[in-house]
Image (cartoon, grey):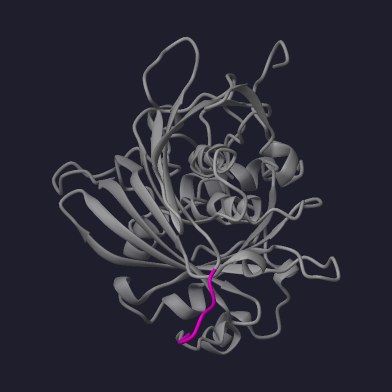
Amino acid sequence: MPKEWVNGNDYKSFAELMTLVKVNDNTYESASPAYSPGGFTRAYGGHVYCQAPWAAAHTVKKGFVLHSVTGWFTLQGDTTKPFRYRVEIIREGGGFCQRQVYVTQHPTKEVCFTCICSFKRPEPSYAERQLKVDIQEKYASVLRGRKIEDWPECPGVDSPYWWAVEQKRGFVDPFPGLNMRKVGMAAYNKPRPTLERKQLQYYQVIGDMPDDANLHACAHLYASDRNGLFPIPNFLDIGDNYTAIASLNHTVIFHVEGQDLSLTAENGEKHWFVHEIAIDKIGHGRALHVGKVWREDGLHVATCFQDGMLRMPKPETGGGRGRDLSMRVSAQSAFAGGVKKKGEEKL
């Protein structure tokens, strides 16, 4: 590790971002600092959410590919220190195998994140079905006439107080690993009730990717946590009027194998994927994020479920903490903070 890390806010390749140093047969350490929305030192939760399964992938036999991850965020991550990943074998099966990963940061031995990962061997598909969804047609009211590159980079914190910060300073903190774009959804969402509203986020990989299906799977995991809970207050039209928002646990299930996980085509061109975000339930201080990941040709790649904490002030007390950055717990899995460009739509 270099003498000093602050954060990993630069446009480095995903492969470089995921580099691990082997400590022993079941322990690995991150070699690059994590992204911190807003340029601070709270780590983006998606970093450990994808790098822990990547560490686990180093312990499975050739041919096993990640198909499911469930993780729990327990402590805030610090971008100034490397993450250490300890992998435990749960089961070695012929067709499936499972690993549990515990993540810590020196000097504490307290676990800041843990996950269970399941890997499977490829097998033929004899009765394949999926819902046919044409994203361009479904969301024509906002997508028609716009290229993906026309949309602004995703803000690190997709909340009004941070949109104002970005607009004032005039730039978005560089997000490593992926080129991610937020679609302005106002025209689609405005006439719809809360639970029918959607948020679209497009992404493609930065840099070259080795031919390793597990690394490509981890790139999808990395994207899945980006601003995952901020649509909740945005869909509710409450702006910054909340006191705490944080991920509790996060699950991603992949529905495809091997080549269909790839972020690059055979000719080397990079695929665009879109994360379609919805909120299915809000209540009792929590909310359920449900997301679907689609490839540009309509292939349903993955489904995401995120159980999030959302706390709002009591009706008689009024305002939340949205503009007080020091008091903010971000939606990045109790790990981080964020970033908007001029002219970006709110939803």
Which of 109 and 289 lies nearest the eye of the viewer?
A: 109
Residue 184 can be seen, yes or no: yes
Where in the figure is residue 186, as x and y percent of width and height?
Answer: 49, 73
Which of 338 and 206 lies nearest the eye of the viewer?
A: 206
Q: Give the residue at x 68% y 52%.
A: 178
For the image, the number of numbered tags is: 0
Q: In the shown orientation, is residue 249 left or right of residue 65? A: left
Which of 126 and 188 lies nearest the eye of the viewer?
A: 126
Split into 4 quadrants, where in the image is the N terminus? top right
Where in the figure is residue 213, as x and y percent of width and height?
Answer: 65, 57
Query: Is 18 placed above or below 1 here?
Result: below
> Farthest right residue?
267
Q: Give the residue at x 67% y 67%.
A: 259
Q: In the shown orientation, is residue 180 left or right of residue 314? A: right
Q: In the shown orientation, is residue 333 left or right of residue 19? A: left
- Let me know if residue 127 is in the magenta part: yes
Q: Main secondary structure of the magenta part?
A: loop
Query: Is 191 placed above or below 55 here?
Result: below
- Let me know if residue 48 is in the magenta part: no
Where in the figure is residue 21, as x and y percent of width and height?
Answer: 66, 25
Where in the figure is residue 85, as x and y percent of width and height?
Answer: 51, 28
Q: Give the residue at x 75% y 64%.
A: 264
Which of 341 and 155 lies nearest the eye of the viewer?
A: 155
Residue 41 can be seen, yes or no: no
Query: Is 115 placed above or below 266 here?
Result: above
Q: Give the residue at x 43% y 27%.
A: 326
| Range covered by the magenta-colored residues | 123-128
